[in-house]
Image: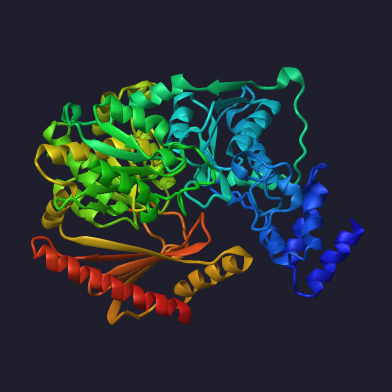
Amino acid sequence: MKSLEAALTEAVSSGKLLESAQANILALLAGSSGGIAAQVVGELVKGGEWQELNDRFFKTLAFGTGGLRGRTIGRVVTQTEQGAGGPNDRPEHPCVGTATMNYYNVGRAVRGLIAYAKQHVGPARRPKLVFAHDTRHFSRDFAEFCAKVCADLGCDAFLFDGPRSTPQLSFAVRQLRADAGVVLTASHNPPHDNGFKAYFDDGAQIVDAHAEGIVREVNAISGEHYEPLPGGGRGTITILGAEMDASYANRLETLLLRPELLVGAATRIVFTNLHGTGGHINVPMLRSFGFEVLTVPAQDVQDGRFPTVESPNPENAPALKMAIELAQKENAEIVIGTDPDADRMGVAVRDRKGDMVLLTGNQIGSLMEWYRLKTCFELGWLSHANCSRAVVVKTFVTTELQKAIADGFGVGLVDTLTGFKYIAAKLRKYENAIPADKKGDYRALSEEETRRLRLEYSRFFVFGGEESYGYLGSDAVRDKDANGATLMFAEVAAYAKSVGKTIPELMDDIYQEFGFHQEMGQSIVMEGADGAARIQALANSYAENPPAEVDGAAVVKVRDFAKQHIFDQEGDLLPKEKMLFVDLEDGRSFAVRPSGTEPKIKYYLFGKAAPGGDLAADKAAVANGLESLWNWIAADAVAR
């Protein structure tokens, strides 16, 4: 140990190793109960892998409101970590480090969550926690580990028998009346990443009301050793399977507004789960409604390497390439893809010329919002008398077309900060506004019963979404749900077919009525310890020195969400967030924010044209304006 400490000290003196990395290495080794940590660090020191050590140890992985996310396989894999190897060519052991995803950090996270759940529940009963996982490397191992720790420390654990989606975890927490839940996933991140995504008793990701207490408990834990309770004080582990799947699928079916449209629709769909969890629910559900569903055999395999794609993200066109090729070959009308934990959904549709066209997340959400609002009025659920009690919820960085649509129907729209947990917080608010003597056991009520209560006493959530391909059509789930979105979009497709239109033609009808809107998403990636510092410096520069003119247009408004007091449309004060919105005199705007889950800074660009104009000309003008705007922003970012 002394020779290792001396080598670390010398590396710090010579500028090869960060002081914070040295401190974290020593803290980890001091808090490790045997294991492989010392061997791994020794190998990296011996090999002179100082950048790898900096990236693994420059910080302690912070537990935030979204939980944890980081690398579980290092850029450099040591012989000790590789060991005998694991499933799908992964190493035997996860990446050692204080800034990485491994048993050390997962253990801290779950023990802190357990400690807070016990405080919240009190001594009267044992807390209940639900654990799910996707198909990533180490996801099952981490989930089983969490369930064991949970039971060892006197809580009852519920663990799915195999990979399941993030929205199903949210549903199960509500269905089981659990006190918390965790899904082991890094969503659509690269294969080397994993994460610990935490939920509280309403089935939503933790927000400020509980986050501070949970974070405090997690941060108080420095070592990985814990003492299991004596036998009588331990909890149980219950395996969840087909019965919970059926409950979830049955609730999803209530998302259909006009199920008769699907009868005899004979629409041919190519579905891909991109090696993840989406096919478990979606494929049998779509087939049960009469859709002809083809899948991509090479991508049906649940494999954490995601071997057929560069990125398992349905936001990116290459991820759907194999599905689109199959659709062309088999003359399918729609391609639907979901990410590994099935909370995001991407779509390609056939146009009048027969070509497959990729839709953006903003377009997919706008189509579903428009259809659901239109149909709610047609069914008599909404009317001019009660539409003020209906609401659409979106994030600030989601298209303003959705506001124009809501305004057109006379329905309220609320903007939230980025992250579906803020949409879920609105759902909690609307549920809590129903008088207790009226709502009874709200979670046991049917969709029809909850809709009636919300329209009478609160606000009826019709639809919610974010530009990053996340959508929700019911408050029975409290996170974005690609399984539900798959069914909702299939109904939109069946409706378009029933009126003799393609989906792109339906989209153009919406543009003609509500105005053409186009958005552009861009990002600058900066990885590792150095990258994290550069991202923060660039983000800070916009707040400290906001532009007065952008691409030849005067800046008319700057909204700094980190410093200003900003209220939403319902008068609720928004939490502070590092995001800056710039509105230009010519109608264009852009937002900038550091990503909370990936090593990048994100830019969101917005352009629009008034309704009723020459649509082809409007599309060209807005696209050119956004391209020019991004060129200016990119050059300005380098100068900053």
Is 118 or 448 nearer to us in this picture?
A: 448
Is 255 or 278 nearer to us in this picture?
A: 278
Residue 560 location (% of width, % of height): 41, 66
Residue 590 location (% of width, % of height): 34, 67
Residue 621 location (% of width, % of height): 19, 71
Q: Residue at x 75, y 67 (%)?
A: 19
Q: Residue at x 30, y 72 (%)?
A: 627
Looking at the picture, the colour scheme in use is: rainbow
Vertical comparison of 275 with 548: above or below: above
Q: Residue at x 28, y 28 (%)?
A: 453
Vertical comparison of 127 with 14: above or below: above
Is 502 or 605 nearer to us in this picture?
A: 502
The residue most toward the front is: 329
Query: Could you tell whether 495 is left or right of 245 in the image?
Result: left
Vertical comparison of 240 with 350: above or below: above
- Would residue 521 be seen by someone viewing this image from the given angle? yes
- Would residue 342 be seen by someone viewing this image from the given angle? no
Residue 483 location (% of width, % of height): 36, 36
The residue most toward the right is: 2
Q: Residue at x 70, y 53 (%)?
A: 97
The total number of labels drawn is: 0
Which picture quadrant has residue 605?
bottom left
Which picture quadrant has residue 585?
bottom left
Query: Which quadrant would the N terminus be assigned to in this image?
Result: bottom right
